[in-house]
Image (tube, rainbow, N blue to C red):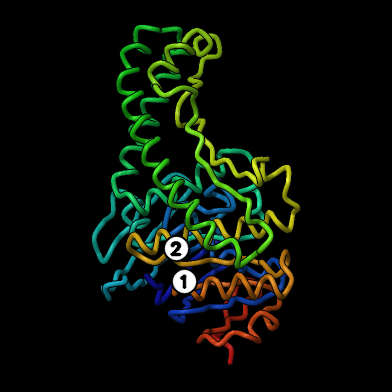
Amino acid sequence: MRVKSLNINNLRNISSTQIELDPCLNCFVGDNGAGKTSILEALAVLSKGRSFRSGQITSLIGPENKHFQVVGTVESQSGETHRLGLERGAEYWTARHSGEDVTQISELTCLLPYVLLEPSSHTLVSGPPDGRRKYLDWGVFHVEHEFLTLWRRYNRVLKQRNAALRQSNMMVVESLDPQFTQLGEKLHLARERHAASLNKMLHKKLPVFNETLEGISLSYRKGWSGESLAEAINAANSRDLERGTTGPGPHKADLYLALDGVSAKERLSRGEQKAMTAAMIMAQAQLISEAGENPVLMLDDLSSELDGAHLEKVLKAGLELNVQIWLTGTDLSTAMESCDSSYRMFHVEQGCVKGPVI
């Protein structure tokens, strides 16, 4: 999948702009605060309805109206053209796909997959489990098409079970447990399959970024001890009742990253964490591509975190995936010197996008 054009209206400091994109590589250059990341945000919002920077929709709405709009024309791997549009206000959203109303934003997400590497991405290695679960689930969603329904059903039952625990209503808890365990086991198996694929792909990608991390392993921890989820929640019932929340289950799962058997976040330097993260993002992009639609690879402001040599490695690895790349930075001249791909360069200044610049 490749984005052919993107129209943005009233999103952060971008008043109105239309961008015609290169099918391979697109570079957005400008000072800090110019609006470069907002362009990437617009694509993310069009795909999944929310930004990767802030959970507050109101922070995305510019000063000119009470809503923002993003419209994109995309071309699938099979050559089909789709026109996607999203309008969001503080309390509502509407979306369309090729002139038809969309009732689930996930319909847009399927048509517009993306992966993102940005300065804070290293928390994928060093941060809490929630970020790694989201990373894992994003990949499973694009590889196993029934996963979203399963994920939604599990989380709905989990919320109901937690509400019953807070009310000390064990009759309701016990009535929910068979469904909770069945959905939880299925969710676990889908994640476990994808984690195994990620581990294999990671070992292919990691030497590109750091040849010294041969002892790295990625394993999936399911979120409960023992084989049976039913036995785990039964054993935890009194503790769950006391705390008012469900302990065991895939909502507590994690991707465990280790170097020679020791937690990676304890062993790896900041630079090694960045290399590990880049390899994980590229591995995810590869698996999504193999499952169907190529994702857009968004590389945001990496020049502020990586030196020229490492940025060149990331860009080269992205180009080898044969995906469309969106790259931002204050100065990309060094990174582009050795680039033999076609590309378009855009200059971003105070929310205005000029280009492509020759």
- Residue farthest to the bottom? 358
- Tell me residue 160's x, y (percent): 39, 21
Please name whichever residue, 201 or 7, is drawn nearer the observer in this view of the structure.
201
Image quadrant for the C terminus? bottom right
Q: CA distance from mark 1 to mark 2?
A: 7 Å
Residue 112 is drawn in which quadrant?
A: bottom left
Residue 74 is drawn in which quadrant?
A: bottom left
Please name whichever residue, 204 or 335, is drawn nearer the observer in this view of the structure.
204
- Tell me residue 200's x, y (percent): 48, 54
Q: Earlier in the sequence, mark 1 or mark 2?
A: 2
Residue 116 is drawn in which quadrant?
A: bottom right
Which residue is label 2 attached to?
A: 286
Image quadrant for the N terminus? bottom left
- Residue farthest to the left? 100
In this rendering, does residue 64 appear at all?
Answer: no
Q: Amino acid at mark 2?
A: Gln
Q: Residue at x 60, y 64 (%)?
A: 207
Q: Residue at x 59, y 53 (%)?
A: 53
Label 1, secondary structure: give it: loop
Asked if disc 1 and disc 2 are in contact, CB closer than 8 Å, the reply is: yes
Which residue is label 1 attached to?
A: 321
- Tell me residue 205's x, y (percent): 54, 63
